[in-house]
Amino acid sequence: MNNPAFILVAGPYRSGTGDDPAKIALNLAALERAALAVWKKGHIPLIGEWVALPLMSQTGPWTIGDEIFESLAYPVAERLLARCDAVLRLPGDSRGADQDVALATKRNLPVYRSIEEVPAPAKD
């Protein structure tokens, strides 16, 4: 990679939580720790929830899994992937992260399975 890349961090958000807000918060924290590692590697991390959650809050009351959630959560990640250069797929079951990987693969984007696989940007 010649320049800092936009890397979508994909992993469990809702999966395995039983929709328990505390467990969802732990999953988001894990995504954000990975995002910080991407940043420290010299890239620009993105997490779909960083965009989707504020949008959902502007629609009015919503709950995990409802129509508002479904209309934004996965479509936001899909739009972000149109601008991303790669995906970092964190471990764990996740329908949304699997969709992100499938779309990235279709678009011939690199999919990294660990932060160690993410190359540093080349120095100019």
Image (tube, helix red, strand yellow):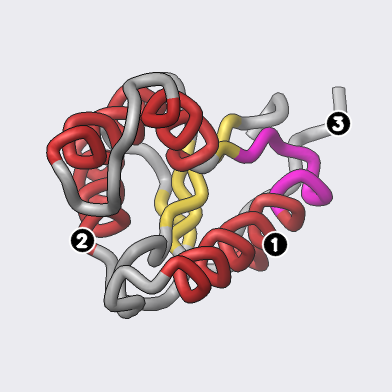
Q: Compared with residue 118, is residue 116 higher up or lower down, i.e. above or below? A: below
Question: Image quarter for residue 122?
Answer: top right
N-term mark: 1 or 3: 1
Residue in the picture at 33% in, 21% down: 59
Q: Is residue 69 shown left or right of residue 24?
A: left
Snapshot quadrant of residue 89: bottom left
| Distance of label 3 from label 2 (alpha carbons) | 36 Å
Q: Which residues are magenta?
A: 38-45
Mark positioned earlier in the residue sequence (1 or 2)? 1
Q: Earlier in the sequence, mark 3 or mark 2?
A: 2
User: CB atoms at circles 1 and 2 under 8 Å apart?
Assistant: no
Residues under labels 1 and 2: Cα distance?
Answer: 20 Å
Instruction: Decide if residue 103 is on the left or right side of residue 53.
Output: left
Crowding near pointer 1: few (<14 within 10 Å), some, many (20+)? few
Q: Which residue is disc 1 drawn over?
A: 33
- Vertical placement of 123 versus 11: above or below? above
Does residue 26 belong to the magenta stretch?
no
Question: Residue 36: horizontal and vertical position, in percent?
Answer: 75, 52
Q: Residue at x 49, y 54 (%)?
A: 88
- Which element type, helix, strand or loop, lies under badge 2? helix
Residue type (three-letter) at the residue carrying disc 3: Lys
Residue highlighted by disc 3: 123
Packing grade of label 2 (10 A; few <14, some 14-19, many >=20) is some
Residue toward you, 93 or 101: 93
Write the residue at 76% across / 44% down: 39
Q: Position of residue 45 (x, y in %)?
A: 63, 40
Task: Specify the amino acid type for callout 1.
Answer: Arg
Q: Amino acid at mark 2?
A: Arg
Where is residue 115 drawn, in percent x and y? 64, 63
Q: Which residue matches tag 2?
A: 95
